[in-house]
Amino acid sequence: MKIIYCSNTGFTKQYAIMLANKLGIESIDVKDIKKYDIKDEEIIFLGWIFAGIIMGLNKVRKYKLKCVISVGILKLTDEYKNELIKSNNIERDKSFFYIQGGIDYKELKGIKKILLKAVASNIIKENKNENEGIINILKNGGSLVKEENLNDIIEYINKNNA
Ligand SMILES: Cc1cc2nc3c(=O)[nH]c(=O)nc-3n(C[C@H](O)[C@H](O)[C@H](O)COP(=O)(O)O)c2cc1C
């Protein structure tokens, strides 16, 4: 079993490394998969969300995907999770998880920074009283990465590993 991740500013990579340490397996940047023979390996995939799309997922669909973990910033609701499943063509029976990462304006470059600022100001307008923590992170940057966010995932992997 191997972990493959796609990270833009490092939050998804942090989760990938945490999970790799917890499970005692290797984590590989999706950019490097050609260097590895992973066709017979089960793959745990983590990808950051860019405008509703789980980045890097298309590069690993042909492998034996054990589960897909998406990392975004919005609050998880059933509706949001279903939207992600639908727009990323995830099979219903594939195990799918969503966890919150963070925003690092120093690491964001070019068009992505401009896009996020636009997305952020829309969210801020729509959610005046909600999600204070998320709104603050959208404005100023910050991290919601916590080891405990991986608990359900680790439980799932351990259960399905017999
Ligand atoms: C341009 C842009 C668009 C984003 N779109 C979404 C989105 O649609 N939904 C979401 O939950 N998070 C969205 N995010 C937040 C990122 O998914 C989040 O910051 C994630 O933790 C980034 O992970 P990384 O550090 O591994 O790149 C967006 C971020 C950027 C920069």
Image: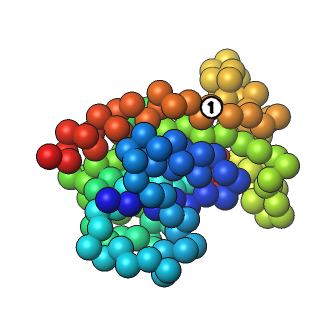
> Around disc 1, counting alpha carbons within 10 Å, would you say few (fewer than 14), some (14 to 19), or many (20 or more)?
some
Residue sitting at x 71%, y 47%: 119
* Residue 160 vertical placement versus 115 (above, below): above
- Res 83 seen here: no
| Relative horizontal placement of residue 160, taking residue 58 as reference (left or right) | left
> Is the CB of mark 1 within 8 Å of ligand 1?
no
- Quadrant of residue 154 within the rendered picture: top left
* Residue 123 vertical placement versus 51 (above, below): above
* Residue 17 vertical placement versus 6 (above, below): above
Q: Amino acid at mark 1?
A: Leu
Q: Quadrant of the N terminus?
A: bottom left
- Quadrant of residue 74 within the rendered picture: top right
Q: Nearer the viewer, residue 95 or 91?
A: 95
| Relative horizontal placement of residue 136, taking residue 93 as reference (left or right) | right
Residue sitting at x 38%, y 78%: 37
Label 1 belongs to which residue?
A: 144
Residue sitting at x 50%, y 80%: 35
Name the spot of residue 159 as percent of width and height, x first: 20, 39
Name the spot of residue 59 as percent of width and height, x first: 45, 74
